[in-house]
Amino acid sequence: MDADSDVALDILITNVVCVFRTRCHLNLRKIALEGANVIYKRDVGKVLMKLRKPRITATIWSSGKIICTGATSEEEAKFGARRLARSLQKLGFQVIFTDFKVVNVLAVCNMPFEIRLPEFTKNNRPHASYEPELHPAVCYRIKSLRATLQIFSTGSITVTGPNVKAVATAVEQIYPFVFEITT
Amino acid sequence: MTGRVCRGCGGTDIELDAARGDAVCTACGSVLEDNIIVSEVQFVESSGGGSSAVGQFVSLDGAGKTPTLGGGFHVNLGKESRAQTLQNGRRHIHHLGNQLQLNQHCLDTAFNFFKMAVSRHLTRGRKTAHVIAACLYLVCRTEGTPHMLLDLSDLLQVNVYVLGKTFLLLARELCINAPAIDPCLYIPRFAHLLEFGEKNHEVSMTALRLLQRMKRDWMHTGRRPSGLCGAALLVAARMHDFRRTVKEVISVVKVCESTLRKRLTEFEDTPTSQLTIDEFMKIDLEEECDPPSYTAGQRKLRMKQLEQVLSKKLEEVEGEISSYQDAIEIELENSRPKAKGGLASLAKDGSAEDTASSLCGEEDTEDEELEAAASHLNKDLYRELLAATPGSSEAAGSPQWSGRPPALESLLDPLPTAASLGISDSIRECISSQSSDPNASGDGELDLSGIDDLEIDRYILNESEARVKAELWMRENAEYLREQREKEARIAKEKELGIYKEHKPKKSCKRREPIQASTAREAIEKMLEQKKISSKINYSVLRGLSSAGGGSPLREDARPEHSGSARKLSRRRTPASTSAADAVTSMGKRLRPLVSTQPAKKAATGEGLLPSSPALGAEPARPQAVLVESGPVSYHADEEAEEEEPDEEDGELCVSALQMMGGNDYGCDVDEDDGY
């Protein structure tokens, strides 16, 4: 029954964060002047460039390190990162696309039942922590996957992990625990 | 030490006498070890005949050095760092705990938590205040006292979430499971603050029942317990005919007004709210409600479903509209050259133009309306096409699209063509090297598949646009730029004046080594070198005393070293002496007792001076050596405090001595030395 429910549960990936390097020094001022979709934050020394096609926002530092956020899948993230590198190339920098790595994946999933949080916390003591004064959700950490789940009483669960596979595994792991505490 | 071999005979039979602390070989009798550390208890006879064990109680925490030599001040001097940290922590805990009215047992437990945290290095990189607050809150949770994290953050004026983060970390690292907060814990505390007088107990009971009802109705998961308490107390108060306004309850419970109202409305939605007061006290409804956020979510789902149904109906209507749209588009294609005159020349079908012009005359009125609609539709279509890939767009509206690229290119031509030309080589390199290396991702070459260059070109501004953007940015960030310029100007000015101090990142303070000095005088010297010079010390007296003991021998032998060291001393004390002079005049009375304690030290240093300073070069003992040899210190202090003018006069006489000493500001010092 659990396996069936897993198949029925749809996990929606809302955000994929990735980093890559261009291995060349980037002149932020030039990018800021000639780019149509950039915000130049001089006080912190970075440029925010937003792409429309895969809707992503990239933070560019002058050292050549770039962080890309806002993609909805790993392939899209890579695609967006490549587009970004291409546009930097067009601006005149000798860009080399190296060290692409997906750093963080954020996903949301909905359980069709409510969850009793205080009981859940009691049963899963070391991993789960619940502070109603601070945050309405239970924070459940899976060390082996390096994933964190935030479980709300309505049944919606927010998962963050290093890649999509870890996120899926985390949801599968948490399902039996959550199922036994339903109303 | 079992298994040892005797040096003399090689025998292994060695007898260890614990009482005497010896290790003796039984074969040849040679003593192998003497004075082994023994752990015997020694007894001492006290007056009256009784005997007591010799020893001290040493605390677990510190090194055990009793800091009572100096009278109790400088408590932390001489202790090791860990002991100091723990002592500071203990002090803070007691201070905070007393404000929260925690009993001694709780404070001790909190201190234990703190000790655990320190031993696991959790205090590193965190403010001690935060860690202590977290320890205290942990105790509150485990003991079940009605203290909220909010109270602690109120006392410390720190953000609640920051404290919460530290608290969660502490609980996790120390593996302490803090039991979840029960809102019922807070009821007595808030009820007391709301002042219900005699009926306090009854109101509390009612509020507790309400809370339990709320729990069963799933209102309490994920909510601040204080908000629920507030709502329960408000209702309970009204039930017992107490007029407590929302504002009063809020000030006690520390939640927002909207939160309270929301809780009340949620409670209103439950079936329990329909019962009368008496019924409520007697009956407990069986059914349980869903949590309010769940019902809200369900409502949203229902809305979505409604929308879907609506949209389906809309689609049917849209189908009809799209057919009209197609018809309009066809008309527009024919009439476009008229609508967009500038680009008409670029349009490829010349025949279309002719037909359009012929059509124009006939369908003028129609065209005008159509034009308006068409331009509007065109814009939408254009945007859609832009969003989609060019491949698909070609299929959609090809004549329209064909009109576009030439226009775009003409617009973009003044763009960084030089740049694009310059890049073309690198692009060719990239592509060629990419083809040569099948494993492109590892080498970092840019895989250009699927990337639309034209669209990327659109992201690059041309010169005029760049200028406008630069201006905009300058205007927006004018504040920051101004600050930068001011900072640079300030640095330049300081550089000119030569006082430019570069603010390097702070180096961590090196741990000071304990002062190793053979004489007390050296010790004082070294201490003064290391520590900041205090204005309360009378350095002239210090100096005088230190050389007082060695007065006569000094006269005989040339002691350049002594004078040298004295000079060093004087130079060091130069900045202090002036302040000392001021201090003396202003706090004469205060200084006298201090000064009186110094002579004890200085007599010792004076005597110690003799062996410390070897005979060296030929500098004769200066007259001030005689002068330095001073009599009772208190006399000097009196003179200093009361007679300032004679100071100056004497200062003139001894200027030469002072100059030789190297301290020109020693008006009062010299006076002292003189007038003994």
Image: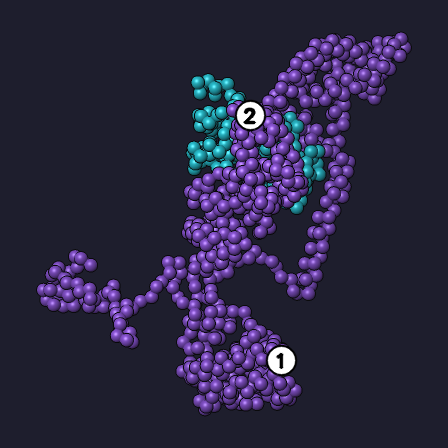
Chain colours: A cyan, B purple
Q: Residue at x 43, y 61 (%)?
A: B80
Q: Is residue B293 left or right of residue B326?
A: left
Chain ID at mark 2:
B
Q: Nearer the viewer, residue A161 or B553?
A: A161
Marks 2 and 1, Cα distance to the nearest angstrom? 80 Å
Q: Which residue is mark 2?
A: B290
Q: Nearer the viewer, mark 2 or mark 1?
A: 2
Mark 1, other Cα within 10 Å: few <14 / some 14–19 / many ≥20: some
B210 relative to B386, above or below: below
Above or below for B321 versus A119 = above
Quick check: A39 left or right of B542?
right
Image point (49%, 54%), residue name: B93
Residue B457 visible? The answer is yes
Front one among B236 and B389: B236
- Relative image position of residue B447 (x, y in whole percent): 57, 27
Q: Who's the residue at 62% across and 29% down the image?
A: B268
Q: Residue at x 25, y 66 (%)?
A: B41
Estimate the x, y position of residue A178 in percent, counting from the top left: 47, 27
Q: Residues within 10 Å of mark 2 (few under 14, many from 20)?
A: some
In the rendered image, which quarter is residue A41 located in? top right
Name of the residue lying farthest toward the left: B27
Residue B567 lies, with reference to residue B215, above or below; the image says: below
Residue B394 location in percent, x, y? 69, 15
The answer for which chain carries disc 1 is B
Element assignment for label 1 = helix
For label 1, the residue is: B585
Q: Position of residue A51 (x, y in %)?
A: 65, 30
